[in-house]
Amino acid sequence: MLCKRSVLISLCLAVGSSLVQGQDQNKKGSSQSPVDSGSAPQRFTQEGVSVEFSANSVSTGSGKTAELLAGTQAVVRFRIADANGGKALTNLRPAVWIDVHELGQASDSRRCREKIQSFLQPSFDRRPTIDLNAYFILALNDEPNISVIDPYGGFGGSKLYTLIPLRSPGADWLMSRDRRKLFVSMPSARQVAVIDTVNWKVITNIDTGINPSRLALQHDDRYLWIADDEASSAATGVSVVDTITLKVAAQIVTGEGPHEIALDEEDNWAFVTNKRAGTVSVIDVRKLAQVSSSKVGSLPSAIAFSGLSKAFYVANEGDGIIVELDGSGRESRRMKAQPGLGMLKFTSDGRLGFVVNGSTNNVSIFDVASGKIIQVVPVGPAPDQITFTRDFAYVRSSGNEFVTMIKIADIGKEAALSRFPAGQKAPQESRSRSMAAAVVPSREDGAVLVANPADKMIYFYAEGMAAPMGSFQNYRREPRALLIVDQSLREATPGEYTTTVKLSAAGQYDVAFLLDSPRLVNCFQLEIAENPSLAKPAGVVMRVDPVAKDEIAKVGETHNLRFRVTDSRSNKPITNLNDVGVLIFLAPGIWQQRAWAKNLGEGLYETSFVPPQAGVYYVFFQCPSLEIQFNQTSPLTLQAVRK
């Protein structure tokens, strides 16, 4: 499987060894508080470690005990500390799943371990109700939509989880700090889409300026800054959106664009480049008003802030000058490179600035302490983007399929260069263009994901390899840019691990908690109440059963698969559905087919396919009118044999 869950694999081994050592280990030297109503904290202590679990409605905050309702969002929180001194335990990677508690089954340690071990196995028919270890790969497509790909538990080669429709193709995107909202600029629609990343739905579309493109988000999440990508008018600039009300708070004219935006680390000042005007505008964030504008050079194409020098740096495409500006916008120093400068980015410590040059096919690297260019590194043709991991700078070249890697530790010496092919074709062979990153760090350390729109593929590369380790399909869509959305637990404050989830149907749930070192296994309890405001169809739980048991299909012949759809609560057939989607794939995803099932009446439906080869086929189902996706139903399995 691509992008292996290395942490969870080790946890799986830990659970297995725990089972061998004894099923009642939890009972010795451990304690758990009784289940309280709603989201009251529950505590578990073992091996000198205390774990406190709570879940609180997003609307009520974490300080109140409130009833958790189906279909709403909740913050799940684990506080992990030394049981003796109360010291917070940091840098841990707990694994957590939320799953329906089976009626009549005791919540003992043995069943808890069995449940966790089943989640850790590569199984298509045993998935938790909510996986708090999940992350998604988002592809901003040339079409007006976004692909959401599940790299762990997806279906078939594409692993497509869902597709988010947009009013028009996106140009740039940003995630809020709490990971609950995704903002996407749509130039053709003159709007910015706001997407809820818990349920993957568009919340609203905000009307902005003439041609919204580049986005910037303040460190405090207060305002979203949107640049107009308009060069023919002097009456352009930036729009500022209040992220709470999702309304435009200000529109500030700065001069002829296109524009790039940078903010200082305290969100006091916003610096905006005006490319055709050759100027940089300084905006007071608190007043939302321009306070000054200064000439910086010919065609300023990029701007970035260094947290180390507390200064802004502007790259000028026309004359090849890199200008340093202090916090008030006054020029401090100049560095001479060559005309053709493009993207400018800093390493995480703010010490080294990297500027690509699409005309001379190199990267100029400067040191903010000396204010001098210390190295010029040749790269591939038409470089246009830079991405950093801990050890390397990745430079994408749109003129060929190779990505160049520059080892950061060797900057200033003879640069250690390497490269790898991210596909078969040069990205510029596609008409798809984006200012958002096409190369992004993976969730795994020392690895990146690369979007190649010409190949219509996403590649996974691990440092030290000569070529990508694998790839993700994007269903013939051209991926302009990529984004990683990590919905797993993260350490918000020392020892406190949280994430936001959308609660499932009403009922009793087990919250299965697993920690590798020290080894802890426990199932907390969670109750979700009925939500009277939910529409009736959303409460339907669809179950799919085959009409014929142990069906055998024949390779090369049309096979008609009939199945019955029922409400799993009432056990009554669900009739008159015209949008039952069927996904059939040959394990492990080397062939697949999608189709809409034919309604035969009285809860009976049919789909047909021709198996291309012998093997085991998995059949998944969706129903948009019931808000049920492929990953929410248990699959059917079917074997195909040769005649």
Image (tube, rainbow, N blue to C red):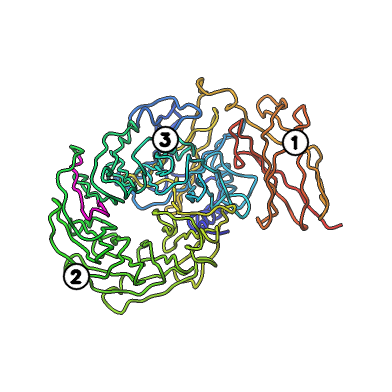
**From this viewpoint, which residue is outermost toward the front?**
232
Q: Which amino acid type is shown beneath numbered disc 1?
A: Lys
Region of the chain picked out in magenta, as a range: 273-285
Q: Residue farthest to the top? A: 532
Q: How far apart are the two marked residues, 3 and 1, measured between alpha carbons? A: 35 Å
Q: Is residue 51 visible?
A: no
The residue drawn where x is 56% and y is 42% is 128
Q: Which sits in the foreground, 559 or 291?
A: 291
Q: Is residue 310 visible?
A: yes
Q: Position of residue 626 (x, y in %)?
A: 61, 30
SS class of the residue under badge 2?
strand
According to the picture, the residue beneath numbered tag 1 turns out to be 598
Q: Is residue 172 above or below residue 530?
A: below
Disc 3 and disc 1 in contact, CB within 8 angstroms: no
x, y percentage for residue 383? 39, 66
Q: Mark 3 sits on what residue? A: 205
Q: Residues within 10 Å of mark 2 (few under 14, many from 20)?
A: some
Calculate the distance from the C-alpha at mark 2 to the C-alpha at mark 3.
44 Å
| CB under 8 Å between discs 2 and 3 | no
Q: Amino acid at mark 2?
A: Lys
Mark nearest the camera among 3 and 1 is: 3
Q: As drawn, is 183 to the left or to the right of 151?
A: left
Quick one: 564 or 91, which is closer to the camera? Answer: 564
Residue at point 27%, 70% (across, down): 338
